[in-house]
Amino acid sequence: MNFIIFGVLAPILYWLIRMAIKNFVINFINNAKRNSGVKNMTQCSKCKMFVDEADMQIVDGDFICTKPECKK
Ligand SMILES: [Zn+2]
């Protein structure tokens, strides 16, 4: 009897724990990203520097950073 209960509960528990860990890891990564201010970095197609996507402009389909020499 115990073996039957264990055989049914173990996979369910395993699955629940896996889901819990997965959710925890996803939340942890999202929180870490938010807290550390990690942003999407994109390479400027002119100076080849990696710049925060929010500071980029798209010019003719290319990402251009806001530096004066790149904006030309
Ligand atoms: Zn640039």
Image (tube, helix red, strand yellow):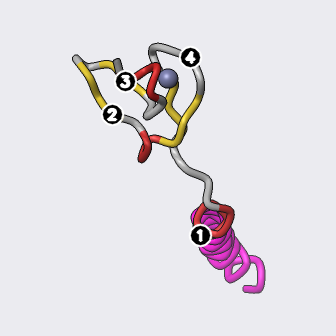
Residue topped by disc 4: 48
Instruction: Tell me what residue is drawn at x 68 percent, y 83 percent.
Output: 5
Q: Residue flagged by tag 3: what amino acid is it?
A: Lys
Q: Residue 21 location, x and y as percent?
A: 67, 68
Dot 1: few (<14), some (14–19), or many (≥20) neighbours within 10 Å? few
Q: Nearer the viewer, residue 54 or 69?
A: 69
Kindly indicate the quadrant of the structure image that contains residue 35. bottom right
Question: Does label 4 or label 3 sit earlier along the sequence?
Answer: 4
Q: In this picture, which residue range is highlighted in magenta?
A: 1-30
The residue at label 4 has a CB less than 8 Å from ligand 1: yes
Q: Residue flagged by tag 4: what amino acid is it?
A: Lys
Q: Are circles 2 and 3 on residues that touch, CB within 8 Å?
A: yes
Question: Does label 2 or label 3 sit earlier along the sequence?
Answer: 2
Q: Residue 14 location, x and y as percent?
A: 68, 68
Residue topped by disc 3: 71
Kindly indicate the quadrant of the structure image that contains residue 37. bottom right
Secondary structure at numbered mark 2: strand
For residue 57, the mark is 2
Secondary structure at numbered mark 4: loop
Question: Does label 2 or label 1 sit earlier along the sequence?
Answer: 1
Judge from the rendering whether residue 56 lies leftward or rightward of residue 27; answer left or right. Answer: left
Q: Is residue 17 magenta?
A: yes
Q: Residue flagged by tag 1: what amino acid is it?
A: Asn
Residue topped by disc 1: 27
